[in-house]
Image: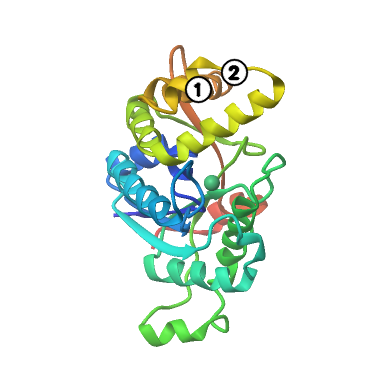
Amino acid sequence: MKTVLMFSPHADDAAAFCGGTLAKLAAGGWNVVLVRITDDAKDSVGLTVEETIQRNTEELHAAAQALDIGEIVELGFPTDTLADVSETVLRERVVYLLRKYKPYAVFTFDPFGQNEANLDHIRVAQVVEEAFWVSCFDLHHPEHFKEGLEPFSVCERWYFGRPVSNPNRAEDITDYFPKRVAALAAHKTMMRNTVNQFRLQLRAWGRRAPLLDAAMEGDLTPLVMGFLHAQSSAIAAAHSLGEGRLGEEFRVVRFGDMEEFFEQISEPI
Ligand SMILES: [Zn+2]
């Protein structure tokens, strides 16, 4: 069984950016492990920090169940402050997890994305990118080896973003779209905070949106489905997946410019 590690700065990133593909891999027999980097302690409207942590954690478990994610690993860093966390401190945790879980692939935000404004996303993307090669060095964190771990390199890096730069892979997620909608709608607390951000921005503009007002109290599914459908339809069209299909796009990197060389000189173990 192949393992994939999804490095999720926040609870909702998996459902928001790549949930259909994770559910598709799980259905294909992959062991999907979600690594949640932060505690999401501030991502709510009108709740205390304690209530926020509890609800966002419960809702992550519901979302993970919808996507058939097999395991959640909590790193517990304070949210919205990762830019102040030492790169090497966070990197050690990622290297440890790569050596422990030995994933075939990792999913992470695009470290070279142009439009990413969230510094937690940027920090995690940078850290995972460096951990990819640092995890191979036997002089980096040799203390891990006392636990029986060993140097390890992941085979594939799957980058997503808003949007990912130079995508080279589109996954048809049409069959898994309902799971992705259910997962994102399960993040009621975080989604309502997102909705409220737009309400406040609209208010400053002098406008209001009844659809957003309704989502603050009622079912989030219509809003989430509308947004995700528009996004994944556009991706499917851009990659010619076919009429009525839905997609998620990635830049999948293995050996870069040396891919052809390694295909020529290698053979199955
Ligand atoms: Zn996020």
In depth, the one of 82 and 237 nearer the eye is 82
Where in the figure is residue 39, as x and y percent of width and height?
Answer: 46, 58
Q: Quadrant of the N terminus?
A: bottom left
Considering the numbered disc 1 on the image, is that residue within a helix, a strand or a loop? helix
Considering the numbered disc 2 on the image, is that residue within a helix, a strand or a loop? loop
Instruction: Inspect the image, locate mark 1, and give the three-letter code of the amino acid beneath it.
Output: Leu
Numbered badge on residue 212: 1
Relative placement, left or right, of 185 versus 124 is: left
Q: Is residue 243 above or below residue 65?
A: above
Where in the figure is residue 15, as x and y percent of width and height?
Answer: 43, 39
Numbered badge on residue 118: none
| Quadrant of the rendered image containing residue 207 | top right
* Residue 45 visible within the image: yes
Relative placement, left or right, of 14 versus 72 is: right
Query: Does the CB distance between marks 2 and 1 fall below 8 Å?
Result: yes
Q: Which residue is mark 2?
A: 208
Where in the figure is residue 189, as x and y percent of width and height?
Answer: 42, 40
Q: Quadrant of the C terminus?
A: bottom left
- Crowdedness near tag 2: few (<14), some (14–19) or many (≥20) residues, C-alpha within 10 Å: some
Instruction: Inspect the image, locate mark 2, and give the three-letter code of the amino acid beneath it.
Output: Arg
User: Which residue appears farthest toward the top when viewing the image?
Assistant: 243
In depth, the one of 151 and 159 nearer the eye is 159
